Image: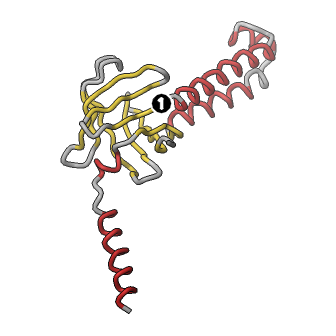
Amino acid sequence: MSARYSILFLVLIIAIIACNRTKKDMLIRNWHAVKLDNPQLNDMIQQQQLFIDTVGTSTNAEVNRTLYNTTRIDSLKSALQSQLDSFVVLQKMALANTWFNFKKSGIAVLTFNGATDSTSWHFDDDGTLILDELQQTGGVDKLKMLVVQLNDTVLRLRFMQNNINSVVSFHPEKN
């Protein structure tokens, strides 16, 4: 019986130690962006797609020339669809090429679509992740992000930029 209790005690100790990891400890690693949740952006893409799908369907050639400066609605739709598709592809590429590497020293190396920047990072008293002195992002002094979720498999950060609310999901880099 004592061996059984020893094993149970050891498992309990390991569980307690694992639970005592701080947010800072869990954050320290290289994270790869995998998803962007942005309702305003999604709505804009849907509205643009609806416009493309319906442009010129309820107007005649004369009205189309006045409104869209063309009577070739199929060509207009094709050009607009190409622009929208390119925008969506660029967004996906930017996401696929975004990495946040948080170091124990309080430095983070951030890669946004191939451009790398470094910054200091910390958690404020409310638990908000603060990135200080981003140089290549147009002089942003501080970027504040709410940690929505953080564990061994996912990091989700919420931030506001230009009054647009976004949540970015990251997975840890696979070694």
Q: Position of residue 129 (x, y in %)?
A: 29, 41
Question: On the rendered structure, is 155 left or right of 120?
Answer: right
Residue toward you, 164 or 150: 150
Residue 131: image quadrant is top left
Q: Position of residue 143 (x, y in %)?
A: 30, 32
Residue toward you, 62 or 42: 42
Q: Residue at x 41, y 38 (%)?
A: 30
Residue 124: image quadrant is top left
Residue count near mark 1 (Cα–Cα under 10 Å), binned few <14, some 14–19, many ≥20: some
Q: Residue at x 34, y 68 (%)?
A: 14
Residue toward you, 84 or 90: 90
Q: Is residue 80 above or below residue 96?
A: above
Q: Residue at x 38, y 35 (%)?
A: 101
Q: Is residue 80 above or below residue 147?
A: above
Q: Position of residue 74 (x, y in %)?
A: 81, 17
Q: Secondary structure at mark 1?
A: strand
Look at mark 1 in the image and give the residue it sits on.
Answer: 98
Question: On the rendered structure, is 78 left or right of 174?
Answer: right
Quadrant assignment for the N terminus: bottom left
Question: On the rendered structure, is 134 left or right of 165?
Answer: left
- Tell me the amino acid under the disc marked 1: Thr
Question: On the rendered structure, is 102 left or right of 51?
Answer: left
* Count of numbered circles in the view: 1
